[in-house]
Each structure stands twice: as structure tokens, then as C-alpha cells.
Amino acid sequence: MNRSDPQVAVIILNYNTPELTHTLIESIEKQASDFACQIIVIDNNSRDGFKYRPRTGAPRQRVIHLNHNLGFARAANFASTLTDAPYLLFANSDCRLTANIVSVMHQYLESNRACAACAPRLLFPDGSPHSSIRRFPDYRNISRSRGSLLPAREGYTIAADTVRKPVEAVSATFLMVRHDLFDRAGRFEPSYFMYVEDTDLCRKFADAGKQIVYLGDLEVTHHWGESCRRQPLRLKLEHHRSIRNYFYRHVPNRRLANLSLSLQLAVNLVLVGFRMVVLRRK
């Protein structure tokens, strides 16, 4: 891969998933072999035996090992300061490329200056889609979002399709952003440890008058949950915390509504945690 004057810096966070990270990087090297990009891996204080190490003979990578887990937002922000590439691609370690969509995403942003970020369609390994498209959370749609015990309804998460279109928000599972606009927006909000930092970033882009575009004709395979299966209860807690944080950040004057939401989240978390413990014992 030609890394002179990289146009895109691929940022990957490794937390106890070195094999997933290796496989992702191998797919990038294979599919984007003729495109100038660099790869930055931040190891978020993985346990011994699970730290990421470049394999012998692998193309050069920038690898940083942290001595404590910063979470997604802060570690991704730190990685963004290590490169001058004009575009950043945040990629979960459990993603795989089956085509060179990196160059296509880059070209789309190059040709559409009003667009701050873009993301492809996500596919499970069996080829079925799962959506990366979000609406901005409100008190109604968040109550039936992923993770809620209430029956899911399309509201917060929008069904995936194969159309290119502006959307309110997308997940950071595989997300390319303009580096300058990312910096101008204040990067990911560091108070989010995991989850919702991507929706928060899209909200800041929208407030600045920029578009978020879903590229439904492009696809990436996502082994959903593989990168976070070792601490499911902790991550459920962080997800609920992040939802609460979003509302207190963006609608701070709705005190009664935010208090009610906090109580709903607390009850849902207890019930979800109880169900997970029961299922684990079976």
C-alpha cells in the first residue's frame, strides 16, 4: 500500500480483540492496496495476551499502547491528533472489507463539500443487513430503541436500504469524516465512554449546517458484538449512561423530562441486567 501523502487515516481501537484487528487490517490491505492511506491502531489497555502487535512482514502501522482504557471517544480523539490526513475513517475491529469502499467514500466526500461524514450499509456475515442509520434521539423514540425491553419500533434506528441519501445520524462502526470539520466540531464528546458519541457528533455537524450521508450502495461486513462480548453488562451500563448524557447535554432545560428519562433508563438497565444474568445461568 502506498502511504506517501495519505488521504485517509484508518483509526482502529483494539480492546482485547487482536485477531479481529488483524483480520480487519488484512482486508484493508487487500481491498485498498492501490489507495494511499495510513492505519493507526490504539490499544486501549488490553489484557496481557490480547494486546495488538503488528505481525512480522505486515505493512508499517502506527500502533500506540495506552496504559489505561480511555473508552471510545477519548481514544479516537487522541488517534486523530496523530495524523495530518484530510480524512479520518473510524472502523470497529469487528468489521471486514469485501471491496475497496475506502476510496469510494473518500471520493464522495471530495466531491460533496457540504457533507461532513458518510457511512456504508452494514451486513451481518450471512449477508443480511443491520442498520447504521439513526434519527436524533427524542423522549419518544429512545424508549423503544435497541436495548429497551419494550417492543422495538422504527423511530430512532432506521431500516437499512441501498440508497444514497442524507440522514440525521449514522453509527461510527465504519464512519469517514472530514478531519478539519471533525476538529472544528470539537471531535467526539469525551464525556461518552462508549456509545452515542457518534450521534452526538452528527448533531454537532448538523448544527454547523453540514450533511451526514448514508451510502447504501456500499457495504461492509460487521461481526456485530464480537468486539464487546467479553463485558456485556458493563457495556449495557455505558449505553444507558450515554443516552442519559445525550439528553442532559442537548436539552438541559427539560429537567422534569430528563429526570423521568433517567428513571426509565435505570429501571430498564436493572431488568436487562437481570435477564442477562438469568440467561447466562441457563
Image (cartoon, rainbow, N blue to C red):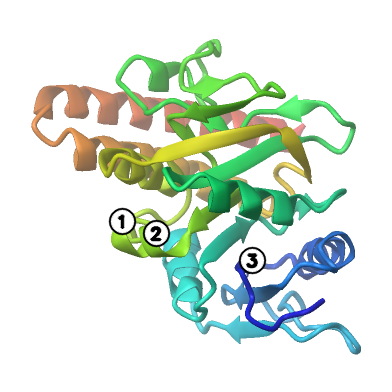
Which image quarter: residue 130? top right
Mark 2 or 3 closer to N-term? 3
Counting other residues with Cα less than 10 Å from the Cα at mark 3, is it few (<14), some (14-19), or many (20 or more)? many
The one of 113 and 168 positioned closer to us in this rendering: 113
Residue 91 in the image: above or below residue 120: below
In the rendering, at what x and y percent does residue 142 appear?
A: 40, 22
For the residues marked 1 and 2, what is the alpha-carbon distance in whole angstroms? Answer: 5 Å
Residue 4 in the image: above or below residue 109: below
Report the residue marked by disc 3.
12
Counting other residues with Cα less than 10 Å from the Cα at mark 1, is it few (<14), some (14-19), or many (20 or more)? some
Viewport quadrant of the N terminus: bottom right
For the residues marked 3 and 1, what is the alpha-carbon distance in whole angstroms? Answer: 21 Å
In the rendering, at what x and y percent does residue 60 appear?
A: 76, 86
Q: Is residue 281 visible?
A: no
The one of 128 and 278 positioned closer to us in this rendering: 128
Which image quarter: residue 4? bottom right
Counting other residues with Cα less than 10 Å from the Cα at mark 2, is it few (<14), some (14-19), or many (20 or more)? many
Residue 182 numbered tag = 2
Mark 3 or 1 closer to N-term? 3
Q: Are marks 2 and 3 in contact (CB under 8 Å)?
A: no
Q: Amino acid at mark 3?
A: Ile
Q: Amino acid at mark 2?
A: Phe
Report the residue marked by disc 1.
185
Disc 3 is placed on an element classified as: strand
Task: Give the tally of numbered discs.
Answer: 3
In the rendering, at what x and y percent does residue 144 appear?
A: 47, 17
Q: Please report the residue visible at 59 percent of the width from the left and 84 percent of the height from the top.
A: 64
In screen coordinates, is 257 left or right of 126? left
Toward the front, the furthest residue is 111
Q: Amino acid at mark 1?
A: Ala
In screen coordinates, is 159 left or right of 167? right
Q: Please report the residue visible at 55 percent of the width from the left and 30 percent of the height from the top.
A: 133
